[in-house]
């Protein structure tokens, strides 16, 4: 495992890979690690006015659902009412009442967080997502649960107490809240201060409770291969080189297609190795933009509009007029 980005979170990546990765929770104290998303950025997101569901949600660990209307407000745009826009006053009121604010997929709408996620995804060859939690002291947003991902937590503000329990006892486990009758040994209890990092391996049960102040943390989830990914990869490998009509007509054509398909699959299956399957699944899983693609800004577009410089993809009004005059003059000459 090589990842300069991860090294800023956990220090020696080789030591982390040997001792903790996917087998043991751990707390790290990196030097001067700053979150790309913090409470100031949260305020900016609210003030921009476009933050809305499903990117934000208010949750409680008590299994009592907080309805979206309790923390959002509708807006009328072009005569049509649209629901789900974030309402900061309502959110703060719910925070004071003990609820937790959850922001989903921050990497999709906050550029600096997106850059962080893109770098980590490229370095680890895995799908990465970012979430942001804000919890009042004594509040708990989620009950004890398991995530289908390795989780890295960066404490941003306040203090939060984390409890991490053991891994699932069997491979046939499900992510989500633990049943009331499932009890697993606790491996770690730690109070995270701002700048601290917690690592929770995939499947290890955990919960967090606000300890002091308005606690905020950024979570990065690192997704790994599932059985579904392997099945999709197998289907992809078995289909390579297959040339059959998508809609065979008649029973005879269908029977021929069945025979050809089975013969092709048997031949392909004998050539596929476990490592081929793993690599195909990994490539499909991480097949997403791993870096922010530089695009021309609107200011650049405006500067290049008349000159036809780099990145100008539209013809400016002056060029259109000239082209139209040339066509008009040519038509007159032809007559």
Image (tube, rainbow, N blue to C red):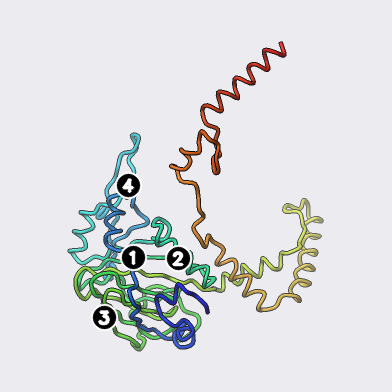
- Identify residue for label 4: 83
Q: What secondary structure is marked by label 2?
A: helix
- Callout 2 touching callout 3 (CB < 8 Å): no
Residue at 52% x, 79% y is: 1
Q: Residues within 10 Å of mark 2 (few under 14, many from 20)?
A: many
Query: With respect to residue 256, does 326 lie above or below?
Result: above
Q: What secondary structure is marked by label 4?
A: strand
The Cα–Cα distance between marks 3 and 1, rounded to whole angstroms, is 18 Å
Q: Quadrant of residue 266?
A: bottom right
Residue 137 % position (x, y): 20, 72
Q: How many marks?
A: 4
Query: With respect to residue 244, does 299 lie above or below?
Result: above
Residue at 21% x, 68% y is: 214
The Cα–Cα distance between marks 4 and 1, rounded to whole angstroms, is 22 Å
Q: Nearer the viewer, mark 2 or mark 4?
A: 2
Q: Residues within 10 Å of mark 3 (few under 14, many from 20)?
A: some
- Identify residue for label 2: 117
Q: Nearer the viewer, mark 2 or mark 3?
A: 2
The Cα–Cα distance between marks 4 and 3, rounded to whole angstroms, is 38 Å
Q: Quadrant of the C terminus?
A: top right
Query: With respect to residue 174, does 301 lie above or below?
Result: above
- Callout 2 touching callout 4 (CB < 8 Å): no
Dot label at residue 172 = none
- Identify residue for label 3: 191
Foreground: 247 or 148?
148
Q: Quadrant of residue 264?
A: bottom right
Q: Earlier in the sequence, mark 3 or mark 1?
A: 1
Q: Nearer the viewer, mark 2 or mark 1?
A: 2
Q: Quadrant of residue 174?
A: bottom left
The Cα–Cα distance between marks 2 and 1, rounded to whole angstroms, is 13 Å
Dot label at residue 132 = 1
């Amino acid at each position: 495992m090589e990842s300069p980005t991860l090294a800023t979170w956990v220090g020696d990546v080789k030591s982390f890979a040997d001792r903790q990765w996917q087998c043991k929770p751990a707390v790290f104290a990196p030097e001067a690690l700053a979150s790309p998303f913090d409470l100031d950025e949260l305020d900016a997101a609210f003030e921009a006015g476009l933050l809305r569901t499903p990117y934000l949600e208010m949750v409680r660990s008590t299994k009592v659902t907080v309805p979206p209307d309790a923390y959002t407000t509708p807006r009328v745009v072009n005569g049509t009412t649209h629901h789900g826009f974030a309402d900061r006053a309502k959110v703060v009121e719910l925070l004071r009442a003990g609820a937790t604010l959850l922001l989903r997929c921050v990497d999709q709408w906050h550029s600096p967080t997106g850059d962080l996620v893109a770098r980590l995804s490229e370095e680890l060859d895995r799908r990465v997502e970012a979430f942001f939690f804000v919890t009042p002291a004594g509040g708990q947003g989620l009950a004890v649960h398991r995530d289908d991902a390795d989780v890295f937590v960066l404490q941003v503000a306040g203090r939060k107490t984390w409890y991490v329990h053991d891994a699932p006892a069997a491979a046939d486990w499900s992510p989500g809240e633990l049943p009331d009758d499932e009890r697993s040994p606790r491996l770690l209890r730690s109070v995270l201060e701002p700048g601290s990092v917690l690592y929770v391996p995939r499947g290890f049960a955990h919960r967090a409770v606000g300890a002091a102040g308005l606690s905020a943390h950024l979570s990065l989830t690192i997704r790994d291969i599932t059985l579904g990914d392997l099945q999709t990869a197998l289907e992809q490998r078995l289909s390579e080189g297959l040339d059959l009509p998508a809609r065979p007509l008649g029973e005879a054509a269908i029977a021929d297609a069945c025979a050809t398909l089975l013969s092709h699959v048997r031949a392909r299956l004998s050539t596929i190795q476990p490592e081929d399957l793993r690599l195909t699944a990994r490539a499909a899983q991480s097949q997403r933009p791993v870096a922010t693609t530089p695009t021309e800004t609107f200011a650049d577009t405006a500067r290049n509009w008349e000159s036809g410089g780099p990145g100008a993809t539209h013809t400016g009004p002056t060029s259109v007029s000239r082209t139209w005059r040339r066509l008009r003059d040519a038509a007159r000459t032809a007559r």
